[in-house]
Image (cartoon, rainbow, N blue to C red):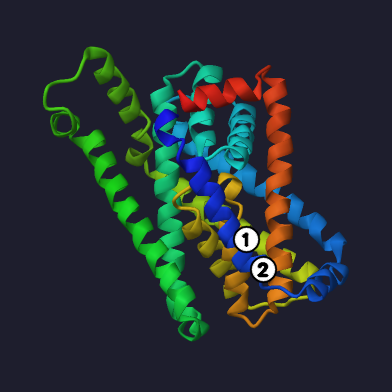
Amino acid sequence: MKGGRWQIPVGIAISLLLLYLVFGRVDLRGFLEAFHGADYLLLLPVVGVIFGNMALRALRWNYLLSPVKKVHFSHLLGTLFIGFMANNLLPARMGDVARGYLLGKLERMPKTSSFATLVAEKLLDGITVLSSLFILSFAVKNLRAYPSFKKALSIGGYISLGLFVITLVALFLIKERSETFMRLFKPSGWSENAKRHLYSFRDGLLWSERWDCLLLSVLYSYLTWGTYALAIYLTCLAFGLRVPLSAPFLVMVAICLGTVLPITPGYIGTYHAAVTYSLLLYRVPMETAAAISLVFHALYFLPTTLVGFFYLWRYQLTFSALRDTASS
């Protein structure tokens, strides 16, 4: 963690800047009126969709792990919530590291195999988000009227594509050309212990050899992000907005691209800017869009954090121990 201490002040600075760009531009009276006019009963299904979204993520993770070991679904769901909770409160997606380590410990399986499936998750997310961005670039005509937003999406898309290609090449080398990978990244030679970790990581990629695991993992990826877009759509309905179908998907893509580089803790600022400026393309008033961004972020942040702490208590762990595990 020592080398990453710069992320905290930089992340806070970016969060404050983006929060200012969103909430510094709103009219306070209109902002409060947007909250006053919302139907909060319609937000209850959003929470249900969010929990369904987490279950879909756990099911996808199950298929990725199935060639390695049959794991308990409760452990998948519990460590997933713990990971989201840690991501909400710690920088640099440290929760992903924590849940990979914790699942390996709970299931008594090689932790590097668990980590490999987490990398595979990011790869599948990349396929889903980039393909959605490609379709939206043709479907959303208003993008041309907002060149700054279009440019930001393009930059995020190119960064995501670059990371996607690098990840894909690295996983291919580890999976199919392990010796070549070892020579490229450490020509001086690998210790036997390091080789064992690499081969365990390779085992976590065996899902790609089975068509059932591969197709179902891709299917669950689209279902996962589809339900995420559904939660956004329902939140808009709660604020009296009937937006086109492309709107929640554009918001979803903007959130994903805005959080590719996880500098801001809990994605505060990046999340709100992505939601707000996406909805502006659909002529949603700034005050209403900002209110939706605040509510939708809270609807995801609070339940995942609270349930994550519940599972942390259930597994008899402390947050400080979890943080130390993720940063070690």
Please give the name of the residue rendered at 62% of the width and 42% of the height, measured from the top-left corner.
Answer: 88
Q: Earlier in the sequence, mark 1 or mark 2?
A: 1
Q: CA distance from mark 1 to mark 2?
A: 7 Å
143 shown above or below 157: below
Q: Are marks 1 and 2 in contact (CB under 8 Å)?
A: yes
Residue in the foreground of this view, choosing between 211 and 319? 319
Q: Is residue 311 visible?
A: yes
Q: Give the amino acid at mark 2.
A: Gly
Q: Is residue 62 visible?
A: no
User: On the image, which quarter does residue 248 sit in?
Assistant: bottom right
Quarter holding the N terminus is: top left
**Residue 296 at x, y percent in the picture:** 70, 58
Q: Residues within 10 Å of mark 2 (few under 14, many from 20)?
A: few
227 sits to left or right of 33: left
Residue highlighted by disc 2: 24
User: On the image, which quarter does residue 86 sit in?
Assistant: top right
**Number of the label disc, if any, that sits on residue 19:** 1
Please give the name of the residue rendered at 74% of the width and 59% of the height, measured from the top-left corner.
Answer: 295
Q: Give the amino acid at mark 1.
A: Leu
**Residue 102 at x, y percent in the picture:** 54, 23
Quarter holding the C terminus is: top left
User: On the image, which quarter does residue 170 sit in?
Assistant: top left
